[in-house]
Image (spheres, rainbow, N blue to C red):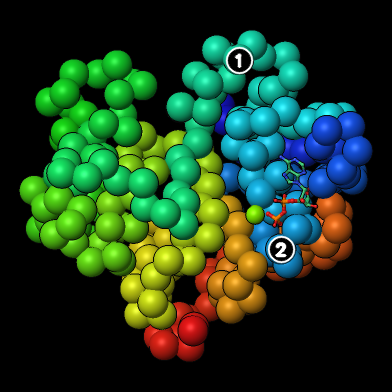
Amino acid sequence: MSPPYVVELSEVTKVYGGQVPALRGVNLTIGTGELLAIVGPSGSGKSTLLNLVGTLDRPTAGTVRIDGFDVAELSDRELSALRGRTLGFIFQQFHLAPGVSALDNVADGLLYTGVPIKVRRERAAAALERVGLGHRLGHKPNQMSGGEQQRVAVARAVAGDPPLILADEPTGNLDSAAGAEVLGVLRDLHAAGNTIAIITHDMEIAEWCPRRVRVRDGLIVEDEGDGAGRPAEITKGART
Ligand SMILES: Nc1ncnc2c1ncn2[C@@H]1O[C@H](COP(=O)(O)OP(=O)(O)O)[C@@H](O)[C@H]1O
Ligand SMILES: [Mg+2]
């Protein structure tokens, strides 16, 4: 049985270099199947929060539980195993391997599963289907548009069916039409049951999400909406 929350942060603080307080006591839970935005101005602590939820860093104080595991109780090795099976990452930069087909960019993301290449490619093809790129399996990054490349990155993030997908400014490098295309894919994945947290400073994306967690000066200042709800319509071209 899966735990009630994919993410449970309790009184989490993060202080860099013994003096810069980036997070000052954060409580946050994310339930299975939610779509939420973590939104706030530059310097508010979003990336720090992403790094902690993504198990890329450990808190100074407080508890971080991911998929039921307290990260403080895991070795670095156990933590990277947890990260591999629990989290899918999408970044502003697509981070695709140049000269490698969409199929193998996604299949290589499944290396941690240890399953044979044939099975990885089957899962990769299925994930590319889910993001509407079933007709682009053999295309290399330089043969695809920005929106298509980011959808390959989305396919890579979902291919292993992780309990949580973390997207850090996923439309930050895209024009508004391509951004709407990627948000549409995230909406469809949410409708299919995936849990997705989008870190963004873009208020329009935040308003579009059914739940919004606002961060300011290292604190959550507002948490509104129902992450299990449906996102708003995407108004193509509304974003700049
Ligand atoms: N590695 C670091 N070392 C020192 N200070 C940092 C580091 N990373 C972030 N900070 C500081 O922590 C605060 C929050 O930063 P960050 O989490 O990157 O915010 P955001 O992603 O919302 O822009 C800022 O004051 C930033 O300067
Ligand atoms: Mg940041």
Relative vertical location of residue 163 with respect to residue 77 in this rendering, above or below: below
Q: Is mark 2 within 8 Å of ligand 1?
A: yes
Q: Callout 1, which amino acid?
A: Asp
Please report whichever mark, 2 or 1, sits nearer to the chain's N-terminal start. 2
User: Badge 2: few (under 14), some or many (20 or more) residues near its Cα, within 10 Å?
Assistant: few
Q: Residue at the spot x=53%, y=47% of the render?
A: 166
User: Badge 1: few (under 14), some or many (20 or more) residues near its Cα, within 10 Å?
Assistant: few
Relative vertical location of residue 109 with respect to residue 177 in this rendering, above or below: above
Secondary structure under the numbered disc 2 in the rendered image: loop
Read off the residue under disc 1.
76
Q: Across the whole image, how many numbered discs are drawn on residues? A: 2
Indicate which label's residue lies in the foreground, 2 or 1.
Answer: 2
Q: Residue at the spot x=47%, y=51% of the render?
A: 91
Residue 112 can be seen in this image: yes
Quarter of the image for the N terminus: give it: top right
Residue 42 - label:
2
